[in-house]
Structure formats: C-alpha cells, structure tokens
C-alpha cells in the first residue's frame, strides 16, 4: 500500500513539474500582454516573467484603437464558421460513401484523397491565386471560404470513425427501405457527434489563424481577417511586443473557450477516430 | 426485401454523396497541383513581363544542385526522424502518467492540450521571446538555473547547432497535447482485466507495458504517427517567423524554400518544382510507413 | 419525411451558401466614378496615419467636386499584398510604395512616369535624394513626401571622457579613428560593448543601415554602372575587408545585441547607428548629451542610407491628372511639414526644410538634410533584382553574426544575385511606357 502511494506521489510530482515547465510559455504570453513593451523583453528571463505586477490594460486598448479589432474578429469568425459548417456537411457525406458504400472506383479515389492529405496549402497557393485572379474573386468572403471546404484530412477523420461504427442499425434501416441520405442523416449523424465535434474544432483551428491566403487575395479592411490585422503591428522596428501579445491573447481566447467547453466531446471524438482507425 | 443487385452496386447514391467533396478537391487542390506540375517545367516568374518558355527538367536539375534545397530536404528528414518518435514517446509518457487516476486529470489534460489550440504563428512569437539571447532570455535563465550556473547564455536561434533543436522543442511543445489526448483515450479503453491477469502471472510493470499496453495501443499509435509525420514535413510557420531558414540553412525546410522562391524571389516555376519533389517525397515516406505498420482495420 | 430540425439546418446551409456564392462582402468598390481617386497607403505609426487621414479630409474639403479615398493596408504585409494585387491587375489610382521596390513595379509595367505630370518648379524644389530614389531607367516614377535619415547617435559625455574628437560631415572619423574610438570607449564600459548597430531589427534594416558601411569602404552591393552583376563588387576586396571588420567587432564584443532595444537610450552604449525615428526617444533620454554624427569614412567618404515611402501613379488609372494634383497637394510646404512633424522624417522639399525646426540650419537633425543634399546618401540599388539583393545581403549579415566565413558568404550571395539577373535577362525595357 505504502509503495503504491509512494509511486503515486512521485508520479504526481513529476506531473506538476512537467506541467509547470509546459505552461511557462503560456503564462509569459498572458502576463506579457499586460506589461509595457520594453518590460516584456527585459523580464523574460527572470521569474518576473511569471509573476504579475504593475499590470495594465494599455496594450489591449492599443489593439482596439489601432486595428478595428471587432470588425476583423467578425470577419474571421464568419469565414472560419462557413468553412467549418460547409466542410462538416461535404466531407462527412464523402467519407460515408467511402466507408460504407460499395461502388466502382471507390478504393482508387480514396487513395487519391489520402495522397492529397500530404499537400500543404503553401504548395498550391500560387496556382490557386492565379485562378482566383482570373475569375475576379479577389477581396471577397467567397474566395476565403470556398477553396477550403473540401478537405482530405477531414474526410480521413470521418472515414476512420464511420468504419468503426456498428453496422446493425444501418442494415435494419436499409431493410426497411430507407434511402442512403436518410440513413446518413437520421442514423449516422446522431451517433457520430464526437467526430463531428472533432472535425469542427480541428478545421476551426486550422483556418482561424490563416495568414498567407488572405495576404494574397484581400486588400481593404472590409473582408480582412484577424491574422492579417496583426501585420499592422509589424511596423518600423522596434516591435511593440506588449501589443502583439495582447493581440495574440485576444485571438486565441475564443478558440480556447470553445475548446474548454466542448472538450469532453472533442476528446472522445478524436480518440474514437484514432482507435477505430 | 431489396434486390441483391442494389445492395452490391451503390454507385449512384455514392457518387451523389461524394460529388461536392470531390469537386472541391478537384477544383481547389488537384487542379492547382497539376498546374504546379506543369509550371515546374517552365521558367515562369511572378509578375514578370518576360515571355514564358518551357525549359524541360532545368528547374529540377537546378534544385538537385542547389545546396539550400538539398539542406532543406535533409532538415525535413531530420526533423521528422527526431520529432515523430520523441513527441510520440513524450505523449505516451504523459498519457500513462495521467492514466493513473491522479486528482485533476481533466485539468491537466486541458492544460497540455492548450498549445495545440494556438496558431503556430503565435507560438513562434512566444518562443522567440523565450529564446531571446543573453542571460535575460527565459530559456537561458532556466538552463543557467538548472545547470547550477554552468550554462552560458546562447543565442539559440542564431546558433547553427542549436537552432534546429530549438525549433524541434517548440514544435513538440505545440503538438504533444494532441497525441496525448488520443493515446490517453486509447489507454482508458484497455480492459483492466488484462493487466490483472498479467500481474497474476508475475509480469512486472515494464513487461506489462511492452506486452499489453503497446499492442493494445497499436491503432492510435499508428494514426498518431502518420499524422505527425505528415505535419512534420509541412514545417513552415516557425521557421519563417523565427529563423528565416538560418543560420546557414540550419533550419530551412522544403516548404520554407518553396514560399521564399515563390514570394521573395518570385520564381514561381522553381517553387512549383519544389512542390512536386516535396509531394513525391512525402508520398514515399508515408507509403513506407503504412507498409511497415499495416494499419489494422478493425470493424467493430 | 424530414423533420423540422433537419429543415432548419437545410435552410441555414443554403442561406450560407447563397451568401458565400454571391460574393457578398466584396471589399473594394468597382465604381467608375469619374471623380473618385482611390489611393492605397501603408498603415504606419499612429501619428502618420492620423496625419494622412487629415490630409485626405483637407483635400476633399478644398475640392468638393472630387473625392480622394484612402485604404490603409497593414505595414507588415504591405509589399506582399500590393504585389498580389498588381499581378491580379487590381491596383488603384495612386499607391504608396516602399522606395527600394519601386524599380520592380516600374519594370513590371504597373506604373506610369511622372515626368510630364508634375510641375517643373515642384520637381526642382525636391531634394536630390527624392529624385534619385524615384527614378528608374531615366524616368521619374515616384516621389516621396519625406526621406529617411541615418546617422551615428553618440553620448557626448562618454566621448568626452574618452577624449575623442567629435567628427563632422566635413571631417568624419577614419577607419583607424573609429576603431580606436571603440577601444577607448570599451575601456570605460563595464561589458565592453560600446556600439549599437540595431542588430535586433534584422530584416530590411540590415541592408538599409549596414550597406552604407560597405559603400564607405569602397565596396557596394552591385556594380552600379550596368546593374548586371555583383561579382567583384559585393565580393570584392573592399567589401570583404569591411565586413570582416564588422565580424571582428562582433566577436571582440564591441557590439551590443540590443535585445531589449534600449542599449542607447538606457546609456549602456556610447554609440548607436540609428535613424530619424529614434530621435525622439534618444533626445528625451539623453537631452543635451545627445550628439548626431555622420557615419565614419572607411576610405571612400562618409556614406549614409536613404529612401523611404513614396507615391506612384499606376499605369491603368483613368485619372492621372487628378492623381498628380493630389500629389502636388501632398508636396506643398504645409502638408510636407505636417507629415514630417508627425514622423520626424526628413521633409522632401527645400521650402519645407527651411521651415522645419529640426531640419533647418542649426536644427538638431540638420545633418540628415546635409548628408542627403550633398550626395552622401546612396540609394539602394535601383533594379528589379532588389528583393533578391536585399535577401542575400541579409543572409550575409546573418552568417557574419553567427561567425560564418565571410568570403564564402559573399560569393554565395553574388552567385545568387547574378543568376537572378541573368534569368531575368537583365530586365530589358519593354517598348514604350504610356
């Protein structure tokens, strides 16, 4: 008994140490966002980086003043939500077809989809840009949303989950004469909430911080998203670290909040995809 | 009862379901990639008023003779070879720790997962501050303290030997939470009875780990390694923000070279050639990975 | 049968799709309003932005039958966004450009020359450096309303303590004097670091702030006569010598890394390479002890950097005269001073210089004007290859800082620059510009 408690204590201690090291950067960011610019750098090496003192909201008010934050926040929210919601629909349907239906060309196409998972956005950005320019789609919401709806990685995640779902429910419904679409919406979807939550969050995370594409296709502030707005803070050196960190905190907080609230679903979803995959 | 024919060939409904996604992938990934494939054989430059011509394999030859690009390939392979196992092992260790049912597991799990939620650009900014040179920099100060004063302050991001490890560290920091969460859930799905039986047979903790835990975690581990490998090859944001490929190419990566070529030097055709090589490389690596681990498709 | 929830989802998704596909939220106007002038500028410091917005308001008030419209674009992504818009053929009527990148846009055919659009008297009043920066292939493509000043700030008390001669533009420090000064100052300095080169800035600063050292030593970034090759120049003897000296100063610990950006203002160092934008902070920290000195003469005279934002009229605009009129407005003495007072930069016209407290003879920053007026300012190479040149030079400095071999870094850069120029066939001029 003593041995077990001892080893439990040791584990706990180890965990605490690792956690402290782990969250030090986060603490530094949070505290730095409340400090005057030059102090951020000055104090980063000492414990003062982690201890709050002399804090102010100056940086936050700077951010609002300098960059019309709310508008860009709304733009990012709108764009990312559209990508997520449309993506959930489009990718889950495709994954279901790959996972459960028998059809010609299925395996070939699936392997193609898997292969496309490799390509990062940067690799196709320029040709895509030429295309967008040709069709006069620059500086709109559409051009920041449409290209990212279909996503090989999301399809893979959905697929991994659907593969592991028990077949009985579907078989029963099919015997009763239900159409494929109906089966999908009334049977699969309600039972696949975890993977939907997972894909939703991961997709959101991927595109919330997207910078390269908006740089290439937007100009004015009307449809400019949040990550691009941070470029306003990269003016003549010296950089204003305090403002930049405050901007960062504000950019990350909503996502963090959503994650903390929905984490149970999310964890279950991510896990089941992986386990069943 | 439906006819057997209908059950076996569901092409029509399948195509309906799959069409939107396929159209999207076709229009926005496949076609641009094919364009890049074609451009790789030209000498196109962004915005140049000069006429474009086909140059055959010139761009590829140029790349294979280019020390920057070759170093980038090497760096990518090195990065993947170090980060994938290290991050996975760390994630497994953390998952094992958290699986012991200590108080506050949910809180810890959330904390470890937090960095995953940060855009990489923000992570790069934070770690730039941590790696600040001079004794004031957090990492320098920490190492100084941990080594009881033996550590001399270094400029991590400018040191040819330390820059890549520095980038690796922050990448692992950002990604380990994702893997940990998966592995933890996997661990929680392993029936306790297996461990009890093994203990009865006299197996110690280490043997239990090797012979029960790891095999049971096979699928999640494979999933996690595949995803991490692909993401490791896409290394870009950190390098662009923190080291710009330096010092002396110590941290340059294929995607960084591609973006530099396309946007800083406006060499669209060269960047396209890099994209093609990149694609083939990662395809080969992931194919090899899948062959060696053949994922078990368990249909429950 | 679909139930109500499904119906709602269905409608919601359709609504979104319609919104997206209708391209709603198009950011830029496509009105062909004959008297609307669309202008893009970078979002700089707050004071600059405020003044700019006020200037637009003033012009609009004075000219009720026209309208000038300003779009501000983040500075950090400015060049990338402009280039993307240019390639897509969507530039407005008047744009601001970062000086060194002018040649690229001019060569690509996105701009139109200003020679016939601007009044001769106006052009005559401009500082020679403004004309130099805005010219490419013998024509004037852009004019700035201010220029930048680069000099060596010094702490008078420390110089006096080390018994050093105070250099002037007529008699700057020589290389020997400079290195002696470093050593003398180091004796009195606790950490031996006495010079701040703002190495923490990195990026374009390296080229802007450090290439004058190269030029002062007789080297340069590229052969300026034909602009075809950097060979023998960037990797020539003089460049090699001065850059090796730079590396020595770093390894001998004379250079403060300036991580917290306060090396000079906290009086840790005696000398600081700096620009006009540092003046306000430095003068409030050092007050009377602040000196502004010319850069040393490393063999070929004291050289300094120059160049900043400038305005250009696009090739596709339908209102070049209106654009020119607005440009002339920005160049009136009052407006030039308004902007120069906001950002502390060197006013672009002689009339404004005479009226400026800081820059007129006897003013604290008069040196900046003198340097530019007397030709000490060397523009960054006016070639479309500039982006590559600056990228390679920054790489050289990075390598020098991490102790790499200077000669091979230089040769490497030369090779890349030369290849870039060759692959662009030397940037031939394409027929007649409009």
Image (cartoon, grey):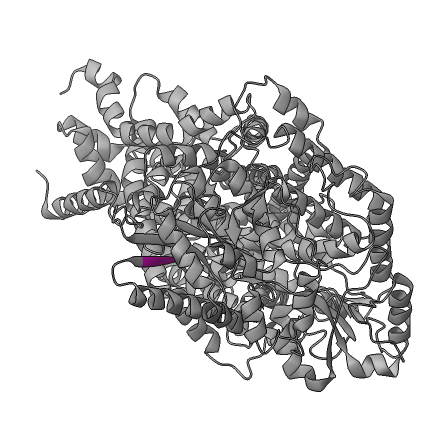
Q: Is residue C316 above or below residue A224?
A: above
Residue B115 at x, y percent in the picture: 51, 58
Residue C36 appears left or right of B213: left
Q: Residue at x 16, y 15 (%)?
A: B3
Splitting the image into 4 quarters, where does residue C411 fall?
top right
Residue C154 at x, y percent in the picture: 76, 75
Magenta residue check for B258: no
Q: Which residues are magenta?
A: C68-72
Q: Is residue C38 visible?
A: yes
Splitting the image into 4 quarters, where does residue C85 fall?
top left
| Residue placed furthest toward the front | C121
Q: Is residue B159 above or below residue C147?
A: above
Residue C39 appears left or right of C167: left
Residue A273 appears left or right of A187: right
In front of the other: C265 or C234: C234
Which quadrant is the C terminus of chain C positioned in? Answer: top left
Q: Residue at x 58, y 66 (%)?
A: C350
Residue A269 at x, y percent in the picture: 38, 47
In front of the other: B113 or A27: A27
| Residue placed furthest toward the left | C1
Q: Is residue B172 visible?
A: no
Residue A122 at x, y percent in the picture: 50, 39
């Amino acid at each position: 008994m003593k041995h077990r408690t001892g080893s439990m204590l040791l584990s706990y201690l180890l965990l605490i140490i690792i956690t402290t090291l782990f969250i030090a950067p986060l603490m530094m960011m949070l505290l730095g966002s409340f400090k005057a610019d030059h102090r951020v750098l000055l104090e980063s090496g000492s414990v003062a980086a982690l201890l709050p003192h002399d804090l102010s909201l100056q940086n936050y008010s700077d951010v609002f003043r300098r960059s019309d934050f709310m508008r860009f926040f709304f733009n990012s929210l709108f764009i990312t939500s559209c990508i997520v919601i449309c993506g959930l629909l489009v990718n889950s349907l495709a994954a279901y077809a790959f996972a459960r239906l028998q059809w010609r060309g299925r395996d070939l196409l699936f392997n193609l989809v898997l292969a496309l998972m490799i390509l990062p956005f940067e690799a196709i950005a320029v040709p895509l840009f030429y295309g967008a320019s040709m069709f006069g789609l620059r500086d709109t919401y559409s051009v920041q949303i449409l290209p990212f709806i279909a996503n090989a990685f999301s399809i893979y995640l959905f697929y991994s989950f659907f593969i592991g779902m028990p077949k009985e429910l579907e078989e029963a419904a099919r015997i009763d004469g239900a159409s494929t679409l109906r089966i999908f919406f009334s049977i699969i979807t309600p039972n696949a909430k975890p993977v939907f939550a997972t894909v939703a969050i991961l997709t959101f995370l991927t595109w919330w911080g997207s910078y390269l594409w908006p740089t290439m296709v937007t100009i004015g502030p009307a449809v400019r998203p949040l990550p691009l707005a941070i470029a306003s803070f990269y003016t003549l050196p010296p950089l204003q670290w305090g403002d930049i960190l405050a901007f960062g905190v504000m950019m990350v907080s909503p996502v963090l909040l959503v994650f903390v609230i929905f984490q149970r679903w999310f964890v279950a979803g991510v896990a089941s995809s992986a386990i069943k995959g | 009862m439906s006819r057997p024919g209908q059950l076996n060939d569901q092409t029509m409904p399948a195509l309906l379901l799959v069409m939107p996604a396929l159209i999207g992938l076709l229009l926005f990934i496949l076609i641009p990639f094919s364009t890049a494939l074609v451009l790789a054989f030209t000498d196109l430059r962004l915005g140049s008023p000069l006429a474009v011509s086909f140059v055959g394999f010139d761009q590829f030859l140029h790349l294979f003779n280019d020390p920057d690009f070759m170093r980038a390939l090497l760096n990518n392979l090195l990065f993947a070879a170090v980060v994938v196992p290290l991050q996975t092992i760390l994630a497994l260790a953390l998952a094992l720790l958290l699986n012991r049912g200590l108080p506050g597991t949910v809180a810890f799990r959330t904390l470890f997962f937090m960095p995953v939620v940060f855009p990489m650009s923000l992570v790069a900014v934070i770690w730039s501050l941590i790696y600040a040179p001079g004794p004031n920099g957090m990492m320098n100060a920490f190492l100084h303290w941990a080594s009881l004063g033996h550590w001399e302050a270094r400029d991590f991001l400018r040191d040819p030997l330390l820059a890549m490890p520095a980038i690796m560290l922050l990448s692992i920091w950002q990604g380990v939470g994702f893997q940990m969460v998966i592995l933890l859930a996997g661990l929680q799905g392993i029936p306790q009875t297996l461990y009890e039986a093994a203990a009865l047979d006299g197996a110690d903790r280490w043997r239990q780990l090797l012979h029960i835990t790891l095999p049971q975690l096979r699928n999640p581990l494979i999933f996690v390694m595949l995803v991490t490998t692909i993401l490791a090859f896409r290394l870009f944001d950190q390098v662009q923000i923190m080291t710009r490929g330096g010092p002396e190419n110590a941290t340059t990566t294929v995607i960084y070279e591609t973006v530099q070529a396309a946007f800083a030097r406006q060499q669209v055709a060269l960047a396209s050639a890099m994209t093609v090589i990149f694609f083939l490389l990662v395809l080969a690596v992931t194919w090899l990975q899948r062959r060696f681990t053949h994922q078990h498709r368990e249909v429950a | 049968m679909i139930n109500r929830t499904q119906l709602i989802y269905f409608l919601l998704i359709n609504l979104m799709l319609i919104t997206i596909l209708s391209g709603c939220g198009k950011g830029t106007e496509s009105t062909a309003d004959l008297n609307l002038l669309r202008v893009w500028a970078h979002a700089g410091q707050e004071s600059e932005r405020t003044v700019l917005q006020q200037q637009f308001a003033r012009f609009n008030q004075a000219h009720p039958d026209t309208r000038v419209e300003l779009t501000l674009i983040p500075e950090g992504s400015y060049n990338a966004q402009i280039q993307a818009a240019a390639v897509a053929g969507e530039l407005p009527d008047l744009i601001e450009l970062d000086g060194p990148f002018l040649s690229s846009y001019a060569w690509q055919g996105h701009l139109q020359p200003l020679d016939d659009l601007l009044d001769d008297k106006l052009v005559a009043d401009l500082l020679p450096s403004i004309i130099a920066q805005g010219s490419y292939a013998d024509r004037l493509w852009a004019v700035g309303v201010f220029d930048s000043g680069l000099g060596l700030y010094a702490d008078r008390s420390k110089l006096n303590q080390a018994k050093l001669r105070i250099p002037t533009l007529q008699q700057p420090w020589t290389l020997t004097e400079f290195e002696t000064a470093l050593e003398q100052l180091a004796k009195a300095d606790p950490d031996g670091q006495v010079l701040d080169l703002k190495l923490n800035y990195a990026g374009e600063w390296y080229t802007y702030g450090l290439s004058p050292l190269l030029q002062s030593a007789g080297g340069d970034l590229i052969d300026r006569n034909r602009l075809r090759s950097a060979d023998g120049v960037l990797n020539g003897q003089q460049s090699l010598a001065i850059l090796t000296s730079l590396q020595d100063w770093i390894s001998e610990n004379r250079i403060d890394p300036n991580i917290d950006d306060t090396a000079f203002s906290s009086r840790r160092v005696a000398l600081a390479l700096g620009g006009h934008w540092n003046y306000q902070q430095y003068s409030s920290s050092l007050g009377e002890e602040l000196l502004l000195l010319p850069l040393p003469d490393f063999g070929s005279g004291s050289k300094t950097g120059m160049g900043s934002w400038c305005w250009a009229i696009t090739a596709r605009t339908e209102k070049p005269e209106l654009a020119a009129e607005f440009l002339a407005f920005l160049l009136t003495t009052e407006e030039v001073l308004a902007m120069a007072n906001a950002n502390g930069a060197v006013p672009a016209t002689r009339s404004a210089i005479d009226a400026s407290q800081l820059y007129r003879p006897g003013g604290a920053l008069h040196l900046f004007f003198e340097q530019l007026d007397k030709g000490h300012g060397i523009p960054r190479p006016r070639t479309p290859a500039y982006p590559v040149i600056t990228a390679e030079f920054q790489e050289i400095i990075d390598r020098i800082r991490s102790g790499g071999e200077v000669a091979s870094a230089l040769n490497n850069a030369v090779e890349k620059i030369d290849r870039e120029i060759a692959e662009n066939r030397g940037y031939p001029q394409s027929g007649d510009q409009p």
